[in-house]
């Protein structure tokens, strides 16, 4: 088993908790569910770096998903105080401790990359969404502030579910975000990192992950074809 620093494990778990992870505050244990076996295995590996942490795994045949959960552990009592009141919360304290690795795990769990196609103009617009409607506006603004510290500006768009808002990232800000998190994105989720452009005019090729995240296209049908190929590759 690969060893990770305690601080790195906590950054990752903070991102997971704010997205698809859940702390059972009563029984002091952690639960996580994902359609990706690769991600559930990755989170398991990080959990096993915590002394005395026992992780269970179960394949959900009905929903074709992967569930992991831990036994009772004092580690979760500490984190529960940071992330829960009567519900899961974003606070200045826990959000200010997120970093680019945390963002990567939130993106894998609750990020959505939209390629908005205009067939009439034969163009596409890349739009990134953090689907975090489980948090109210003022808490999402804390998250936006943290993104801004990493050079990523975003906006809030109203949605008819949850607390009513979703975080939107577009343009060069999306390029910066995807480049920032790309090194920590598992292969199952590389489809969430491909940005399509018709020319190189608006590409920031100085970004560290530029060669991995940018793909040129001639027409929108190229994007549909590429997306299907990527889906097959990722199973």
Image: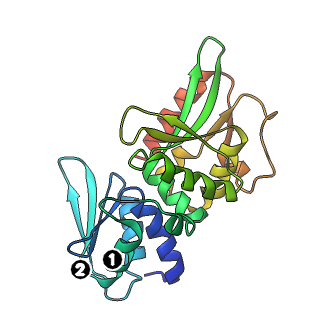
Disc number at residue 66?
Answer: none
From the image, tell me which residue sits under label 2. Answer: 72
Left/right placement of residue 221 relative to residue 159 reads: right
Q: In the figure, 46 relative to 36: above or below? A: below
Left/right placement of residue 200 relative to residue 164 reads: right
Left/right placement of residue 205 relative to residue 181 reads: right
**Quick one: label 2, few (<14), some, or many (20+) residues within 10 Å?**
some
Give the percent coordinates (x, y) of residue 66: 28, 58
Question: Which image quadrant for residue 183?
Answer: bottom right
Residue located at (59% from left, 51% from top): 144
* Label 1 element class: helix
Give the percent coordinates (x, y) of residue 173: 69, 45
Give the percent coordinates (x, y) of residue 152: 68, 50
From the image, tell me which residue sits under label 1. Answer: 76
Residue located at (63% from left, 44% from top): 154
Name the foreground residue: 95 vs 196. 95
Name the foreground residue: 21 vs 227. 21
Q: In the figure, 38 relative to 159: above or below? A: below
Check whether the beta carbons of the residues at disc 2 and disc 1 lie within 8 A of each other. Answer: yes
Give the percent coordinates (x, y) of residue 235: 39, 46
Toward the left, the furthest residue is 62
Name the foreground residue: 49 vs 87. 87
Marks 2 and 1, how far apart at CA? 8 Å
Residue located at (25% from left, 76% from top): 28
Name the foreground residue: 50 vs 136. 136
* Label 2 element class: loop
Question: Which image quadrant for residue 115?
Answer: top right
- On the question of residue 185 being in view, the answer is no
Q: What number of labels is visible?
A: 2
Toward the top, the furthest residue is 120
- On the question of residue 6 being in view, the answer is yes
Q: Quadrant of the N terminus?
A: bottom left
């Amino acid at each position: 088993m690969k060893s990770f620093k305690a601080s790195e494990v906590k950054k990752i778990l903070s991102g997971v908790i704010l997205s698809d992870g859940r702390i059972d505050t009563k029984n002091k244990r952690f639960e996580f569910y994902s359609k990706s076996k690769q991600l559930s295995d990755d989170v398991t590996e990080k959990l096993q770096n915590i002394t005395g942490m026992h992780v269970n795994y179960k394949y959900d045949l009905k929903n074709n998903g992967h569930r992991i959960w831990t036994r009772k552990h004092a580690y979760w009592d500490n984190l529960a105080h940071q992330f829960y009141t009567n519900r899961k919360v974003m606070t200045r304290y826990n959000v200010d401790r997120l970093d680019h690795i945390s963002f990567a795990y939130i993106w894998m769990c609750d990020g959505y990359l939209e390629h908005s196609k205009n067939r009439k103009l034969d163009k596409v617009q890349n739009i990134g969404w953090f689907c975090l409607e489980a948090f109210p506006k003022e808490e999402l603004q804390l998250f936006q502030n943290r993104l801004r510290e990493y050079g990523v500006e975003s906006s809030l768009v109203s949605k008819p579910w949850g607390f009513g808002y979703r975080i939107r990232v577009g343009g060069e800000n999306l390029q910066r975000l995807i480049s920032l998190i790309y090194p920590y994105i598992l292969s199952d989720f590389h489809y969430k990192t491909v940005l399509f452009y018709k020319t190189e005019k608006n590409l920031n090729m100085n970004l560290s992950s530029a060669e991995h995240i940018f793909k040129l296209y001639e027409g929108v049908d190229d994007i549909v074809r590429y997306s299907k190929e990527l889906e097959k590759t990722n199973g």
